[in-house]
Image (spheres, rainbow, N blue to C red):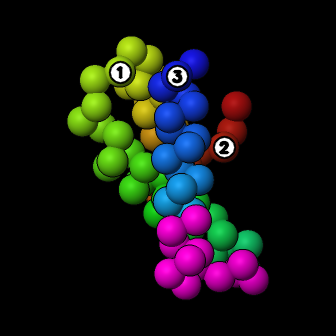
Amino acid sequence: MLAFALYIITHELIHIVRFSKFLQGFDASADERLAEEQRVHARTHDILIGLKLPGLMDVLIFYQDWRRVYEQIDYSP
């Protein structure tokens, strides 16, 4: 649970920094919001990948699809 909480907190802090530096606007289109999520998930991964924390690798694997280009994600069950 700690690993998941760390991922979420890190992810949201990256959003806050990006918004405060005007790297992303609140009025972004749906496509741009998805692209922003991809960028933030990638940055979150880059920050956390080197940490040794039980369960963290499972969390990073769980979110791996969010780091890919959205057109390449297979949404079919």
**Residue 67 seen by the camera:** no
Q: Is residue 24 visible?
A: yes
Q: Nearer the viewer, mark 1 or mark 2?
A: 1
Kindly identify which numbered label has been placed on residue 53.
1
Q: Is residue 22 magenta?
A: yes
Tell which residue pokes out farthest to the top in this image.
54
| Residue type indicated by callout 1 | Leu
Q: Are marks 1 and 2 in contact (CB under 8 Å)?
A: no
The kind of secondary structure element at disc 1 is loop
Q: Is residue 24 magenta?
A: yes
**Dot placed on the residue nearer the N-terminal end, 3 or 2:** 3
The residue at which mark 2 appears reads as 75
User: What residue does disc 3 label?
Assistant: 2
* Label 2, residues with CA under 10 Å away: few <14, some 14-19, many ≥20: few
In the displayed structure image, the side of residue 40 where residue 8 appears, left or right: right
Is disc 1 surrounded by few (<14), some (14 to 19) or many (20+) residues within 10 Å?
Answer: few
Mark 3: give few (<14), some (14-19) or many (20+) Cα within 10 Å: few
Q: Nearer the viewer, residue 20 or 46?
A: 20
Q: Amino acid at mark 3?
A: Leu
Report if the CB atoms under discs 1 and 3 are less than 8 Å apart: yes
Label 1 and label 3: CA atoms lie apart by 8 Å
Q: Residue 74 location in percent, x, y? A: 59, 44
Residue 29 to residue 74: above or below: below
Amino acid marked by disc 2: Tyr
Secondary structure state at the residue bearing disc 2? loop
Q: Main secondary structure of the magenta part?
A: loop
Mark 1 vs 2, N-terminal side: 1
Which region shows up in magenta? Answer: 16-28
